[in-house]
Image (spheres, rainbow, N blue to C red):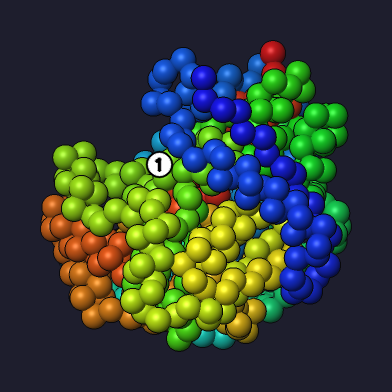
Amino acid sequence: MPAVCPRTVLRPDRRPVRRTLTAAVAAAAALALTTLSACSGTAHPPAGTADAAYRLTAKTPAAAGPVNSFTWSLFAEPTSIDYAYAFDYPPNQILANVCESLLRWNPDLTTSPGLATSYTHPTPTSWVYQIRSGVRFHDGTTLSADDVVASLRRNLDPEVASNWAYPFRNVKSIDRTGPSQVTVSLKSPDSTFNKYLAASPGTVESAATLKKDGKDYGNPAKGVNCTGPFSFGSWTSGQSLVLKRFDGYWDAKPKAGEVKFVFLSDPTTRVNAFQTGEVDGGWMVPPHAYAQLKASQAGTLYFGRNTTVASEIVNNLKGPLGDARVRQALLMAIDRKGIVKAGAGGVADVADSLVSSNTWSGTPDSTVKGLLKALPSYPYDPVKAKALAAQAGVAGQKVVIASSPLDSQTTIITQAVAQAAKAIGLNPQIDTISADKYTALFTDAAARKGIDLFLTFWYTSITDPLDMYGSLQTGAFSNYGNWSNPQFDAAIDEATVAQDPAAVAAATGKAQQTAMEQLPWLPLYTEPVSVFLGKRITGVQPSIAYLYYPWAAEIGARG
């Protein structure tokens, strides 16, 4: 029998300023590290065995009927629900039920028609979309091609400064070319552009609302006016956001009359709310509570498809981590199997690249396996890692590692990375910041100043590894460390303009090879989506697609 590895719940106070760990938190983290070092080994038995740590669920039992309302937890309050800035879990899982895109990303990670009933690709640099008729916005006005044009063009507007500008980097023009037709013309071929229109980049809002609300669009007072199964109801700052069923919805009608999202930043508070029934459900269940919730009588814990990889982002390439040998040494010194045991409850697998296997949808398994086999591996070897770092002459140099009290998982990972940094001769310092400030690291360069490493649970917004690797191209919005490699950039360009799927996969493989040799980010592990449903409700399809798919519309009363 393998040893049972207890986990420590870490609950630092949440002051909205950057600070180092308090003595009490440092002591708790030390205990977590002791647990971590004792728990290295296989993350979990092979899927399908009797002792598997988790199994994926495609769909929970269908709802037996409607429900007046249900309550859902969020780990942080959104700063806005403007789709142009919806770049994180809290705003996206709300907007997925309020706004819709031209295409739809389904829970099985396929794409189907959305507000566009069909599309054509008449030339390598043009996409033509036929807009669905009879669709109404929440204010009762009818969807038109003009609304689509206005919504997509916002991602090109430097005044808006959309977080989704990257998918539009090759766009030359967006025009209405018929009563219900929109044509997007590109500067050069782009194998990913159309796929992005199933996520936030393809969101359609009322052109009149965008013009009327201006810079106030998406704030607590204004909300949004879209076409989804739920409409914006109210937003009580610091407490909750309420959605109301939209009875004029064009697709399958929602089973719930109301959804109330409550902002619960403390992970233990969220778990307690599940147990008492105060909250009916929530995504991103704290891993420290997996065992507790699996045995709970209050509901059921499920796991589903994901495209997420937990990675440490190298934010500063001017310090000791600017040498690829040091990055390689650090990854070899991180006990990733131990992290899976102690931090992720065994519900994860050590990552062999920066993308999960789910992102290679449509690529033959034999091709994917061949690309993975060619990648360098970084097995846990502190002795070899220390020797490699010594070659770079960085002993004693400081590295600052950002963390957040989101849950014990995050703290355990950060402490493990700090332990690894110390093991190879670096001088690690941990700065712990609140969840809302941590989110700013992904959108604000000033917030990242002085930080060498920070943790991300990075999901791809399309089922394509280019979504991840493209974000590391020179000058890309999400290339936080400003890493630049001509060979990598050339491979991304080659994959982007290629029209043949085999050519796209081959070029993407070249980029992946370079990324794993140079390690601008350090991949830790992949994990499934987690969701808890209380005993009142059912019907959801566990999948990372909940960030763009109207998942709440399927939830109803449990039989």
Name the spot of residue 497 as percent of width and height, x first.
20, 68
| Numbered disc 1: secondary structure | loop
Q: Which residue is drawn at 47% across and 23% down?
A: 52
* Picture layout, residue 384 above or below residue 493: above
> Would you call the spot at circle 1 few (<14 residues within 10 Å), some (14-19), or many (20 or more)?
many
The quadrant the C terminus occupies is top right
Q: Pinpoint residue 547: horizontal percent, then vertical percent.
A: 55, 49
Q: In this view, does 445 lie to the left or right of 295?
A: left
> Along the horizontal axis of the image, is 501 left or right of 35?
left
Question: Which residue does the numbered mark 1 point to in the structure image?
Answer: 109
Q: Which residue is drawn at 38% across and 74% down?
A: 390
Q: In this picture, is 451 found above or below 311?
A: below
Which x, y percent locates residue 544? 50, 44
Which quadrant of the figure has residue 188? bottom left
Q: What residue type is labelled 1?
A: Leu
> From where the camera sits, is residue 84 visible?
no
From this view, report whether residue 141 is shown above or below residue 2: below
In this view, the residue in front, 47 or 540, is 47
Asked if residue 153 lies left or right of residue 513, the reply is: right
Q: Can residue 335 be seen in this view?
A: yes
Q: In which quarter of the image is residue 468?
A: bottom left
The residue lying at 39 percent from left, 26 percent from top is 46
